[in-house]
Amino acid sequence: MMTLFLPWLDAAKSYRPVVARMEAAAPAELRERRACFSIDETAVLARVSWREYGSLPFEVGESACGYRLIQANADAAVPAGWREVWQGGRPRNKNERFLLLQRL
């Protein structure tokens, strides 16, 4: 009986759907691995989620990658020198979001 609720729990609580949506919306050069993205050292939750559920390789910390994934509050601004390509998060957590940024 409990297994009936697993898909719902996965969608509501897990980061798997968030990672899948980002990878589906990522620019072709990222999906085709002609470009790379990095995740900040301080974004532990993002690193763990993308390592567990993602299929794209990433670098940690500052890098020369043209894309960067950040974990931010809902009201955080896009850093200077970057533009937002994608944003997402878990449906029930409105204060947390992930942003995929492209270097300008």
Image (tube, grey):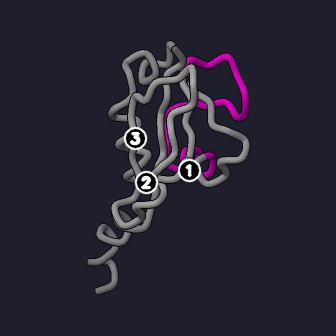
- Pick the front one: 76 or 65: 76
Rate crowding at label 2 as few (under 14), some (14 to 19) or many (20 or more) other CA atoms within 10 Å. Answer: some
Does the magenta run of residues contain 22?
no
User: What residue is disc 2 on?
Assistant: 16
- Kindly report the distance in space between the C-alpha atoms of the residues bearing marks 1 and 2: 8 Å
Specify the amino acid type for callout 2: Arg
Which of disc 2 and disc 3 is earlier in sequence? Answer: 2
User: What residue is disc 3 on?
Assistant: 87
Q: Position of residue 8 (x, y in %)?
A: 30, 70
Specify the amino acid type for callout 1: Glu
Contact (Cβ within 8 Å) of mark 1 with mark 2: yes
For the magenta stretch, what is the residue range?
47-66
User: What residue is disc 1 on?
Assistant: 52
- Kindly report the distance in space between the C-alpha atoms of the residues bearing marks 1 and 3: 19 Å
User: Measured along the vertical axis of the image, is residue 5 above or below residue 44?
Assistant: below
Which of disc 2 and disc 1 is earlier in sequence? Answer: 2
Residue depicted at x 51% and y 14%: 104
- Dot 1 falls on a residue whose secondary structure is helix
- Dot 2 falls on a residue whose secondary structure is helix
